[in-house]
């Protein structure tokens, strides 16, 4: 059983690889907007929303940016991170209202995440963001979907049917996680928040990270000699 699941996971790498050129073009546009004060905002429901919140929450400690610069929004709010709030995704107006609370500006970038590409909450959010003049991206596994049509940069993650039919927490979720890693990390590298492959801006907020920060400083000092 596990071998069968793992064989299906091979599709994830290829699916993400296919969207790398589009991700690169998007980062080229996001970087100057971010430097000018814009934000990177992820929005989605269920697994997709949780993955967006996860990626956003890891950017401040890893790259030393303010939490308000990379934001994750999930249908149903904070409760939905731990508990299913399924009905929240059915309201297309709710996504826009959640973004309205963030007071979007044209410099912001909004990434809608939905494997099916038809989640009303996420589609409504991306359409709202585009009306506000934001740069918009969509992560979806379904071509010609409403979400793909709503965004300027549709990123199609062709992972195919799930081993457990419809369980998009599996291949589709793994592909979303990989794509979001590339997007945020690529952006932060472009912004100079790393030095080579070192997390030069890591926040030393615990024992492990303080030790890592010392090692990074030592490596940088040695490289400068």
Image (cartoon, helix red, strand yellow):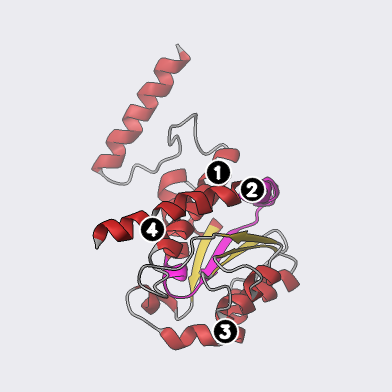
Give the left or right position of residue 78, taking residue 123 as reference.
left
**Residue located beneath label 2 in the image:** 27
**Residue located beneath label 1 in the image:** 186
Residue 218, horizontal then vertical, whole percent = 36, 22
For marks 1 and 2, the one nearer the N-term is 2
Q: Residue 8, which numbered label?
A: 4
Crowding near the residue tagged with mark 3, few <14, some 14–19, many ≥20 C-alpha atoms within 10 Å: some
Q: CA distance from mark 4 to mark 2?
A: 29 Å
- Residue drawn at x 71%, y 62% is 152
**Residue located beneath label 3 in the image:** 94
For marks 3 and 1, the one nearer the N-term is 3
Q: Quarter-wise, where is residue 163 in the image?
A: bottom left
- Quadrant location of the C terminus in the rendered image: top left
Q: CA distance from mark 3 to mark 1?
A: 30 Å
For marks 4 and 3, the one nearer the N-term is 4
- Residue drawn at x 69%, y 75% is 127
Q: CA distance from mark 2 to mark 3?
A: 28 Å
Q: Secondary structure at mark 1?
A: helix
Q: Is residue 121 above or below residue 57?
A: below
Q: Which residues are magenta?
A: 21-50
Contact check, label 4 and label 3, Cβ < 8 Å: no
Residue 184 shows in this picture? no
26 or 94, which is in the foreground?
26
Q: Secondary structure at mark 2?
A: helix
Residue 80, horizontal then vertical, whole percent = 39, 77
């Amino acid at each position: 059983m596990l071998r069968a699941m793992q064989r299906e996971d091979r599709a994830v790498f290829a699916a993400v690889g296919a969207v790398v050129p589009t991700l690169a073009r998007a980062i080229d546009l996001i970087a100057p907007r971010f430097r000018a004060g814009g934000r990177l905002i992820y929005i989605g429901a269920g697994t997709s929303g949780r993955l967006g919140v996860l990626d956003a929450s890891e950017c401040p400690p890893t790259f030393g940016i303010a939490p308000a610069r990379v934001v994750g929004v999930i249908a149903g709010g904070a409760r939905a991170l731990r508990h299913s709030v399924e009905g929240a995704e059915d309201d297309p107006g709710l996504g826009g209202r959640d973004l309205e609370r963030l007071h979007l500006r044209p410099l912001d970038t909004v990434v809608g995440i939905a494997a099916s590409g038809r989640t009303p909450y996420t589609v409504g959010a991306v359409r709202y963001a585009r009306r506000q003049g934001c740069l918009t991206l969509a992560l979806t596994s379904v071509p010609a979907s409403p979400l793909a049509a709503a965004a300027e940069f549709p990123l199609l993650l062709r992972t195919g049917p799930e081993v457990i039919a419809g369980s998009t927490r599996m291949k589709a979720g793994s592909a979303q996680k990989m794509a979001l890693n590339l997007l945020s990390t690529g952006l932060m590298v472009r912004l100079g928040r790393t030095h080579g492959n070192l997390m030069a801006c890591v926040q030393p907020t615990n024992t492990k990270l303080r030790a890592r920060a010392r090692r990074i400083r030592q490596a940088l000092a040695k490289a400068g000699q």
